[in-house]
Amino acid sequence: MNEHDAATRAPIALRRAAPSFALRASGLPQAAQLLACALAMAARETIGRPFDGLPGGAERRPRRRSAMARRLARTLGDLKGPFAKAGQFAALRYDVFPPEVRAAFAALQDRVPPRSFDEIVALVESELGAPLEACFDTFEPTPLGAASVAQVHRARLASTGEPVAVKVQYGWLARSLPADLAVARWLLRALVPRRGAGGLDRERLFAEFAAGLAEELDFEREARVATEIAANLAHDPQVVVPRVHHALSTRRVLVMSWVPAIPIGDRAALSARGVPVADVLATLARAYAKQVFVDGLFHADPHPGNLFVVDEPDASVRPRVLFIDFGLSKHLDPTLRRELRLGMHALLKRDVEGFLDGMDRMGMIAPGARDGVRAAVAAMFERIAGEGQLLGLGGGQVLALKDHAKRLLEETPGLQLPNELLLYAKTLSYLFALGEALDPSVDLMKLTVPYLLRFLAERSE
């Protein structure tokens, strides 16, 4: 495109001005919708509570609580953005919410109707400072997917014709974020009251949520993280991380190379291509073990929509695994990394007090709650000892221990874990669950142990 063409097309960006989203930015619609949901939930609780003392009351209350949680989850999903992310955050908090409530939040679908194409074009042009046609030869109006904070479109670069995926953050998010966070803080206080001694630190909980959300909404950070993870895994030819086009990426637009691929959970498609699932799982185990135990930076959102097998002729011989969406990726804090290592050493030595001391140093035990936590940790150590050598456990045993640990978190007052640690545990447990689902004969623990031993051998200063 020559300078004259660019000049004649420049007014397109001005004509496609984005709406102001003033009403959403006020916070009033969000507060009104949540208030209506809260009143409906309160009415249900008021009507149902008198019947709890009757026969069957023990089963009735969890069912009622589950129904109310599902209603709240639907409302959070409808509100999108930070509210949908708050639901996902709550689903991970085994130390805060009971199982029936977490299950409702876990079922919250992070899929929404797409925004209008004109709105998407306006934002892309505003962010890139040029008409769409100056940057892309083609830009498909129908998105590949639309989630609570962004949608993704296929396109081709004007400069090279390379196929790319363009992730575009919704324009209303930046305007409404302060109001959304204020409403979310009120919601947290309503759902998680202080419990006195041994209770939760609600401000710390909210700060962790807000910090994680800020990271996910910063696409420049996502671009840096994707580039760093790609460099960390570059030694493994079976791992693919899409290339970031930094010149076309901003805080709200992210452009990455597009790679044709098969969802990792589509067993029929993988079988039709003759893909050896055992090789796929081995690659995943190596990639995650290196990220988690060696690099200290890991892709923390390993659900089936973010993991693929590259669709290419060699997939039946040497399948390559594709990682996408690095918005939820975590750098392990050095202090947490050190405490994790010390905690694993204590676990291997069955040193309950040493394990508790580490938890205390990380602020995981509320004042006055150590005795109760000690009993829970001792029970956990006993359960692990009954399974045999920790580093020799199979995937099914690891998942069973994970379920046992979740129950202890739910039943032990005074525990509050850093969200980083919960994401770390979720990532590893998902890997083992995926292995059990796709091919239980693959020993993922055995594949992970060399990286774990390297982690344990590091000096803890």
Image (cartoon, rainbow, N blue to C red):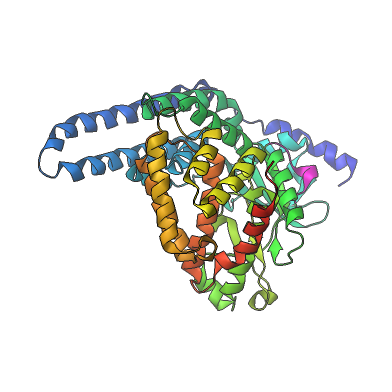
Residue extent of the magenta highlight: 244-251
Q: Which quadrant, please, contains the C terminus?
A: top right
Residue for point 46% across, 27% down = 201
Question: Which residue is farthest left?
Answer: 55
* 221 relative to 273 in the view: left or right: right
Residue 208 x/y as whole percent: 55, 33
When the figure is inspected, residue 453 is found, relative to residue 228, above or below; the finding is below
Residue 6 x/y as whole percent: 84, 40
Number of labels in the image equals 0
Residue 436 x/y as whole percent: 47, 67
**Residue 277 showing in the rendered view:** yes
Residue for point 63% across, 52% down = 292
Q: Is residue 264 inside the magenta stretch?
A: no
Q: Which residue is more in the foreground, 242 or 401?
A: 401
Place residue 224 in its image quadrant: top right
* Main secondary structure along the magenta-highlighted residues: loop
Q: Which residue is more in the foreground, 125 or 361?
A: 361
* 314 relative to 74 in the view: left or right: right
Q: Which residue is more in the foreground, 357 or 336?
A: 357
